[in-house]
Image (tube, coloured by chain):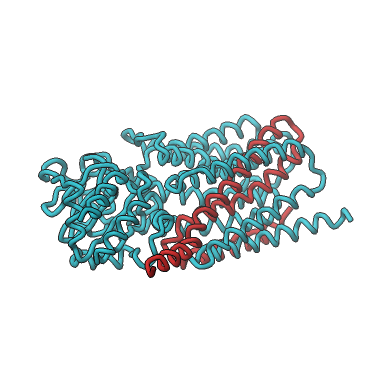
Amino acid sequence: MSEYIPLLIKVAYFVAAVLFIVGLRRMSAPGTAKGGIIWAGFGMVLATLITFLTPHMGNYVLILAALVSATAIAWISGKKVAMTDMPQMVALYNGMGGGSAAFIGAMELYKVSNGHELSAIPMSLALIGVFIGAISLTGSLIAFGKLQGLIDKRYTFPGQNIFNGIFALAVIGFGIYTFGHMEAMNLWIFFGGALILGFLMTLPIGGADMPVVISLYNAFTGLAVSFEGYVLGNWAMIVAGMLVGAAGTLLTQLMAKAMNRSIANVLFGSMGGDDSGGAGGDQGEMKEIEGADAAIMMAFAERVVIVPGYGLAVAQAQHKLWEMTQLLTENGVDVKFAIHPVAGRMPGHMNVLLAEAGVPYDMIEDMEDINPQFKQTDVALVIGANDVVNPAARDDPNSSIYGMPILETDLAKNVIVIKRGRGTGFAGIQNGLFFKDNTKMLFGDAQDAIGELITGLKEL
Amino acid sequence: MIDGFVAVYVFMLAAFVGNEIISKVPVVLHTPLMSGSNFIHGIVLVGAMVALGHATTDLGKIFGFIAVFLGAGNAAGGYVVTERMLEMFKTKKKKDVKKDEGDKK
């Protein structure tokens, strides 16, 4: 019987790989998406269980302890986290995967340093896997910290790109040296260097670019998993890792394209923070409006377009927003939601939040469809969005976000902006929209401000 | 050990499949899909288990433990988060039906 076990394992890995591909395929269409993750989940459970049968294994207690504790922690934290915090959780779990691949590579190479034989191709792939896995680990941790608000500013210094570039080349060069001199100490220095590189690369990247960065590290982890799969001779890892590596790379490009930025630009062109980002205080005064007045304005409008942004998500105000929308609809107002491709912190994030609140699909419009309609819009209600409605991206070639597609709310007849304070947005750039004559500011937390609007609408 | 060139073909084919799948995805699904692909590379757990299972040195065991721990976190966390996101796409329709009925009354 036991001679069939290696074959059984191979078959199970093959089935798992097929399930992953089918699952990913289903996840890419709205109708079948829910089932897709379940297919992939079956593949994962099958592969994990069958691995316990691998011949000549030991340390079962350690394996079970790590497996059970991590599963429990991740499962509970994943269940408890608010929908708004999903992006950073994806970053965190992704970093863990990258770290796992890097540690596997380090283990295999450590064996080589103790006299174990490994031929040139797997050894080089193991080194590359350690390198990108380590970058993915620390880089994702920084991304998590930034989105979670643990790291609230960008760390930049003059010549940073050059410094990072030299550091990266040094680590890569040392990796090549380690390839020829596989000793434990060299390996640790290389591993540590790659970990530090992940920190250095991610620290200067500003908030608006964070989705692209997370997606990039997701692709990195996929590649690292695939390469370490090759070293271990594990086909499930090779196929699944490369699948994610390719899908993640394309997804990263789609996101970067949505923001009109290249991946190189995201990684090396620090964004915002400096005063070159368009004119500052000389744009006039912001005009405040009371909740009740704003409610009247909207109630008597024919057409209202709501532009939700991250501020809405932070305040968890999507349910109240839907309540307000229903009140407006009852008053005969034509209400639409306009979603910027990168609204929230990730593409599609805002769609998920609105879906959670019960907003039907047909009220939600993509940027390309809604932009020509703003001229016929009576009120554009901007909630906690900033950079994605900044006209400087269209008009000011000197602005650091110039060229990024925006929702052209400034063309609407009236604009109401719900905003927590007078500060600049995530990209740190002043927004001319807030100073326009037809723009009124409703200052406050999105939850409270929408509450005021609802009260105002009910009193009509 | 795997024949090097067979692996190159598999790398290539898997890359095309991954590319092909994503190319037609609507923006609505970008975040869930990133999360879903994040879950799929949680398969690294399997490799970590094998690596720890074969570890003999203390250092190997420590590294292996970390690798299994991180890999399992990736897989379990990735699944829960993706499932929760996609759950919303499913329950949405039911809610609408109920609301429509409520409106009629």
* Residue A411 vertical placement versus A187 (above, below): below
Q: Most extreme residue toward the right, as rendered?
A: A1
Residue A306 falls in which quadrant of the image? bottom left
Chain coloured cyan: which letter? Answer: A
* Residue A394 vertical placement versus A29 (above, below): above
Q: Position of residue A237 (x, y in %)?
A: 65, 53
Point 61% across, 44% down: residue = A101
Q: Position of residue A178 (x, y in %)?
A: 60, 37
| Count of residue discs | 0
* Residue A25 vertical placement versus A116 (above, below): below
Point 69% across, 35% down: residue = A113
Chain coloured red: which letter? Answer: B
Point 55% across, 48% down: residue = A221
The reply to whether residue A253 is visible in this rendering is: no
Point 42% across, 58% down: residue = A355
Q: Position of residue A211 (x, y in %)?
A: 41, 49
Depth check, front residue: A316 or A85: A316
- Please give left or right for residue A9 compared with residue A239 in the image: right
The reply to whether residue A263 is visible in this rendering is: yes
